[in-house]
Amino acid sequence: MAVDNIFRVIGSIIFGIIGWYLGTAIAGSSSFELTTLRWTIPFTLAGAVIGALVAPWITTKPARQLRRIVTQLPAKQLVAGTIGLAVGLVIAALLALPLSRLPAPFGDVLPAVGAVLFGYLGITVMVLRADDIAALAGRRWGHDHASEPEFKGDGKPVLLDSSVIIDGRIADISQTGFIMGPMLIPRFVLNEVQYIADSPDTLRRNRGRRGLDMLNKLQRESAVPVVITDMDVKNVRTVDDKLIQLAKKLNCPIMTNDFNLNQVAQLQGVKVLNINALANAVKVLVLPGESIQVQIIDEGKEPGQGVGYLDDGTMVVVEHGYRYINQQIEVQVTKVLQTNAGRMIFGQPTGG
């Protein structure tokens, strides 16, 4: 507010002086005669009032808005805009001399117009095509890092989406050595997990916080590098679409548990690593007639049934197993059923 008041005083003085000169121009005299003062005093007072009102709007407020815009712009765009402005002004300076030799009023106006026009064009072209120009310069000098960044690791990188991070099993899988390349977590995926962690809904908030905990565990214990990357895809709004386009650009797979993302990515030719499919594939294979040890923990849907689970989460439905609840028994497998939810095993107590 103190700065605004200072500029109000300065604006009042400047506009008051302008009002004084306007008043004397209308009165046709600069003397302090009564007829002259009838014009100069009202114009001076009006100019001072107008200056006090408009000074902040033409000084401090534009400066604050410019500062806010500059702080929000990425550094890359600021550098590109500065370079574009310099190039545009150099071109305008080269054209200023021939333009100034044109007959009036063109010779007086066109150099200034050229400076504004080429400065604007330089900024616009550099900001909008900064990535393309950087890629072209990289290929020109033999450094083609703009198209596909380098990552340390034996295999291709793997993109993780938010569902895999929140699921948590990736932390254990990463320690087994099955993932050869670095795991990439784009900044927009990390922002999505953070957004879920800040949700007012308790369930979503807990899932998001578990995802952040899993990220910390991944960075500490993973056998391959975990990279938080700022790579993004322009003109694409949804996180799933960004992941697919980024996977195409890097020629790498996406690891996800999201069914919809799985389907859309495969339709677009992107390889998908689904942890649920992996879990179903590595479940214990049993055949009818074999015997397994099962802890009966609950009753089944049908009367007399008991339900237990193997170590990999496979459900075992035991006929006449209700009386063995909370007991470890030997079960003979009678049928194995594969469903969309996974594998189910049916059996009966050995000797029962």
Image (cartoon, rainbow, N blue to C red):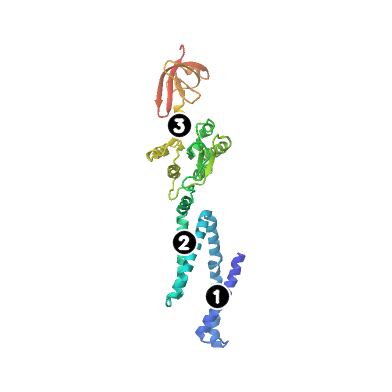
From the image, tell me which residue sits under label 3.
276
Which residue is at the front of the view, 292 or 16? 292
Task: Tell me which amino acid carries mark 3.
Answer: Asn
Which image quarter: residue 37? bottom right
Residue 235 in picture, x, y percent from top left: 43, 50
Residue 216 in picture, x, y percent from top left: 57, 38
Residue 266 in picture, x, y percent from top left: 39, 38
Q: Quadrant of the C terminus?
A: top left
Task: Tell me which amino acid carries mark 1.
Answer: Phe
From the image, tell me which residue sits under label 1.
15
From the image, tell me which residue sits under label 2.
122
Q: Residues within 10 Å of mark 1 (few under 14, many from 20)?
A: many
Q: Quadrant of the N terminus?
A: bottom right
Q: Is residue 67 visible?
A: yes
Q: Nearer the viewer, mark 2 or mark 3?
A: 2
Which residue is at the front of the view, 201 or 103? 103
C-alpha span from label 2 to label 1:
35 Å
C-alpha span from label 2 to label 3:
51 Å
